[in-house]
Amino acid sequence: MPRRWAVGNWKMHTTRDEATALAAAIREGLDPATWDPKVLGVGLAPPFPFLDAVREAVDGTPIAVVAQDCHAEAKGAFTSAVSVPMLASVGATHVIVGHSERRSLFGDDDPAVRAKVEAVLAGGLGPIVCVGERLEQREAGEAKAVVEAQVRAALDGLGDARDRLVVAYEPVWAIGTGKVATPDQVGEMHTFLTALLIDVVGGPLPVLYGGSVKPGNVDALAEAPGVAGVLVGGASLDAGSFLQIVAACAREGTERWNSSTSS
Ligand code: PGA
């Protein structure tokens, strides 16, 4: 699995035709001359009903199809819920778990997030676990403690699954607000997370940054210490913007790849 990722989270946007067209445009626009899928994974997270159509649209490419959430149970009387085996059966390979919108709007607390992470792993898929502090927590100087508690609750003891785990740091105050964290703030939290994850799962994990990532700020964010790519909301709904973001992450990934293999 690649150690860097650019993932587009389409949230509750697109119709079937729009989703298919967006996936096709991204597929067409990915430039094999600059994008090496071994260095940078690219994932698309459409709404549940369009996972299958998006998978078809990217068939035969290394683009990963990602679900935005799942239920922790594999099946049962849970009207409206979608299980990991269902997601696997339509070709999803990864599942976003614990997104702040799930936490704040749908009541996904730490135990629920943990149960979903375990379900994703049990189903053979890879969780992308989102963590991040709210504005008042940052202002109270609690950002690291909040993020550490979320990480430990979600991942403690899961070192054996390390190869399939991805973490996304998404400060809640920067999501969908246009208010982007500074590269210094991002670098500081990612450096903290890098060390924390070694303690929690016994080795480094890819840690993505998410929150108002745009073509104009992605370079500075992607090169911040410890950043292994991005999770993009709004800007991933426009193929041109998302492709620029992918290109920036691919450039940064190739530079880091080259310097790690030459040293
Ligand atoms: P945004 O969303 O890029 O629109 O801020 C990021 C996310 O929620 O993953």
Image: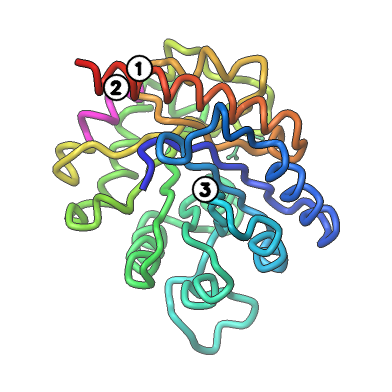
Most extreme residue toward the front is: 33
Label 3, on which residue? 99
Within-10-Å neighbours for mark 2: few <14, some 14–19, many 20+: some
Point out the frontmost of discs 3 and 2: 2
Range shown magenta: 189-196
Q: Residue at x 46, y 54 (%)?
A: 97
Closer to us: 51 or 40: 40
Label 1, on which residue? 225
Please report contact status of discs 1 and 2: CB closer than 8 Å, yes or no: yes
Q: Residue at x 34, y 44 (%)?
A: 150
Point out the frontmost of discs 1 and 2: 1
Task: State whether label 3 is within 8 Å of ligand 1.
Answer: yes
In whole angstroms, how far apart are the C-alphas of marks 3 and 2? 21 Å
Q: Is residue 18 magenta?
A: no
| Spot occupied by residue 32 in the image (x, y as percentages of width and height) | 58, 35
Quadrant of res 7: top right
Please give left or right for residue 192 compared with residue 4 in the image.
Answer: left
